[in-house]
Image (cartoon, rainbow, N blue to C red):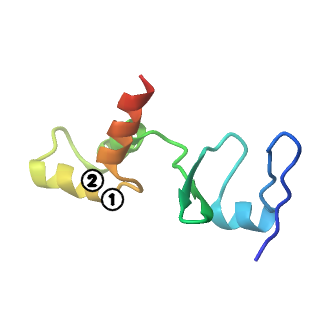
Amino acid sequence: MEKVKVTSKGQITLPKQLRDKLKIREGDYLEAFLRGNELIFKALPSKTGKEILLNYSKNHSEGRLKPGEARHILERLPFSLSERVRTEREEY
């Protein structure tokens, strides 16, 4: 278990061992939420869902996707697409 110190401005530094294990880099975003009495941080993908879909589609298909192929792509996303859409709508 790693210890982190909270600064007077409420900032923390993630230990290098944890950053390396989770592949967190400068400029990445983390989602923070409470679960009971625990503060949980979750690394968010560095690319947007749209970028992931476009890159995957370009690399794994020729032309238009069939519905089954599109579902397969969506299942492999590293986040919930419906949750991401809800979050994006709340920000605007």
Q: How far across and how far down the image is residue 9, in percent? A: 84, 39
Q: CA distance from mark 1 to mark 2?
A: 5 Å
Circles 1 and 2, Cβ within 8 Å, touching? The answer is yes
- Residue plotted at (27% across, 53% down): 73
Q: Nearer the viewer, residue 15 or 46?
A: 15
Q: Quadrant of residue 85?
A: top left
User: Crowdedness of circle 2 by 10 Å Cα count: few (<14), some, many (20+)?
Assistant: some
- Residue plotted at (64% across, 44% down): 28
- Quadrant in which the C terminus is drawn: top left
- The residue positioned farthest toward the left in the image shown: 67
- Residue plotted at (77% across, 68% down): 17
Reading the image, the residue beneath label 1 is 76
Q: Nearer the viewer, residue 40 or 82?
A: 40
- Residue plotted at (35% across, 52% down): 80
Taking the image as shown, residue 76 lies to the left or right of residue 22, namely left
- State whether residue 61 is above or below residue 22: above
